[in-house]
Amino acid sequence: MRFFFVFFFCILSTPLFAQQKNKLVFHHLFTNKPLVFNENYILKNKDTVSIQTFKYYISSIQFLKNKKVVWKEKKSVHLIDEENSPSKIIDLDNMPDGIEFDEISFNIGIDSATNYAGVQGGDLDPTKGMYWTWQNGYINFKIEGKSTFCKTRNNAFQFHIGGYENGLATLQKISLKINNKKPLEINLDVEKLIEQINLSTQNEIMQPCKEAVEIANKLSLLFSIQ
Amino acid sequence: MRKLIYLLFIIFVGFVSFKTIEPLFVIPKGWQKPTYDFTKNKLTQEKINIGRALFYDNILSKDSTTSCASCHLSYTAFAHTDHALSHGINNRIGTRNAPALFNLAWSKKLMWDGAINHLDAQALAPIHNKDEMDETITHVVEKLNASILYKKLFYAAYNDSMITGEKTLKCIAQFLVTIQSYHSKYDSVMNHQSTFTNQEKKGYHLFQKNCASCHAEPLFTNNELVTNGLIVDETLNDMGRMKITQNVNDSLVFKIPSLRNIEFTYPYMHDGRFKKLSEVITHYTSTVQPYKNLPNQLKKAIVLTSNEKVDLIAFLLTLTDRHFLYNRAYQFPKNILTTTKDKQ
C-alpha cells in the first residue's frame, strides 16, 4: 500500500519538477525591489517617478555554449506585460533536458521581417496595443508613468520605442552570461533606464525617431541575471 | 479506356477548381504577379463577405456613424468625389484626400506617404485616426465579439466564432484585394476587342511619352513614391513621406496614384487641390517646382499644346471601367447587413 502512495506521489509530482526546468522568469524591479505601479519613487537626482505601464516584446530566444547556439525557440515571440503576471513567465516546454549552456540571448522587440509581414495573431495581434496604426510597425518597448519633473499634462511621460527601417531600427539583442541554473530568472531594473533619461526635457516618444534609437540603445542596461 | 477516364477526371477536377477559384481573384492577361501573398491569407467567399460587411459597417467607428464606405464610395472607384479631404466622425476633417481603391493586390506601400507596408495592416490607420473613425482595434474586436451577426459570420468562415484583430483585419484585406478594375475601354483595346478613336490614340501616344514612366501600364502607377513638385499648402504643411522617414530627401514625397477611373476620382492630388484634369496637366506643364529631390522625369518641363492636352484627357477617359464602378459584389451587402438590430 505504501508503495502505491510513493508511486502515485512520484507520478503526480513529475510534472511539477518538469515545469521547474525550462522556464524563463522576468522580474521587474525598481531600485532592487519589485516594481509597484503608481508607487512614488525618488531618484538620486530627487526626481519623483511613478510607473503606470511597462510592457515589451521578447523574441528569438536562444541558448549558447562557448558562443555556439545549442538551442533556440521556434516562433519565439512573447509579450511581457507587468500588468499581466503570467506573461512574465515564459515556458520553454520544447527545450530538451540536459542541454548545457553558458549564455542566453534574445531580442527586445520584433524583427524587421515580421514588421513587413502584415498582421499576425497571438501576442502579435494588433489588439494588444503594441502596434502603431498611422504608420505600421510594432512597438518594441513601452513605458509610461508620471514625474514631477515632466511639465506635461498630469506630469505624464510616455516612451513608445519602436522602428525597424529608414536607419531608425530599435531592435536590441541582449546576451547574458549564465550558468545552468533553472528556472532562469532575469531582472529588469526600471530605475536603470529612468535615471538615464532627463525627464524635464524628454518625456514623449510615440514614433520611430533618433531619440527612440538612443533609448533603445540603453535598454541592455536594464537586464541582469538574478 | 482507363487512361481516358483518368484524363476526363483530371479535366473535370481542373474545371471545377478553376470555376471556384476564378471569380474570387483574377490576374488579368499580361499583368505581372501580384505583390500580395495570398498563401498567408487564403481567399474564401465567407471571409470576403465578412470584409465587405465590415467595410460598410459603422461599427468600426467610435460613435457608429462612419464606415470605410463613408469616404470610399464604390460608384466613384472608392474615392470621395468632390471632397478634397477625408471626413471623419463629428464632422472632423482629415489632412488628406481619400484615395481610390482598386487593384490593391499589386500595391507596395499604402497611404499617400507610404506609411503602411502591408495591406493587412491598412485598415488600422483610418480606424485609429482621430479625424476619421477615432476608434481602437481592441474595442472594435470587443464590439464584434458581442455581435451575434459577426459571431455567426466568423464561425462560418473560420469554424471558430472567436474574433481576433488578426482575423478582422485579414478579412478586410480579403475584400480589398477582390476590388479589381481591368475592364476599361483601354483594356478592351489592349485585348483587341475595341479600338481607340483617333483622338484617344493621339492621347495614348502623348501619355506613353510623357506620363507612363511613373503611371506605368497596366496598373497606371509604378507604385513608387516621389515628389511631383507641388507648392506646399500652408494651411496643411503636409511634408509627405518625410514625416515617416525623417529624411529631407523625402520632403513632399507622395505615392504615385493609379490613373484608372480618373474621370471619377476628382479632386486630385494628396490634398485634393485640383478639381479638373486640365488643372493637373497644367501643373505638370507649368508649375512644377524645382525641388532638389524632383525625379528625373519632371526635371524637364512637359510641353503640350492645348490640343494635345485635350487629346491626353480623351485618352485618360478610356481608363473608366464601368464594369468595376457598377459591380454589385463591391456594393453595400444588403443580404448580410440587413438590419442594425441583428448586430446588437
Image (cartoon, rainbow, N blue to C red):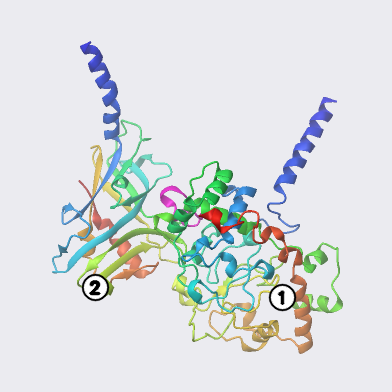
Residue B10 sits above or below residue B73 on the image:
above
Residue B343 sits above or below residue B274 on the image:
above
Using the image, name the chain to which the residue with label 2 belongs: A
Three-letter code, disc 2? Cys
Res A128 quadrant in image: bottom left
Mark 1 neighbour class, 10 Å CA radius: few under 14, some 14 to 19, many 20 or more: many
Residue B326 left/right relative to A84: right
Res A102 quadrant in image: top left
Residue B6 left/right relative to B292: right
Foreground residue among B315 and B77: B77
Is A117 magenta? The answer is yes
Q: Position of residue B63 (x, y in %)?
A: 47, 66
Foreground residue among A174 and B199: B199
Residue B1 left/right relative to B220: right
Q: Position of residue A176 (x, y in %)?
A: 27, 48
Extent of the magenta region: A114-126
Residue B173 in sight in this render: no
Using the image, name the chain to which the residue with label 1 belongs: B
Which of the labelled discs sits on residue A150, or is there none? Answer: 2
Under circle 2, the secondary element is loop
From the image, which quarter does the N terminus of chain B lie in?
top right
Three-letter code, disc 1? Glu
Mark 2 neighbour class, 10 Å CA radius: few under 14, some 14 to 19, many 20 or more: many
- Measuring 33% from the left and 60% from the top, which residue is drawn there? A142
Q: Position of residue A134 (x, y in %)?
A: 47, 67
**Which residue is identified by label 1?**
B263
Is B156 magenta? The answer is no
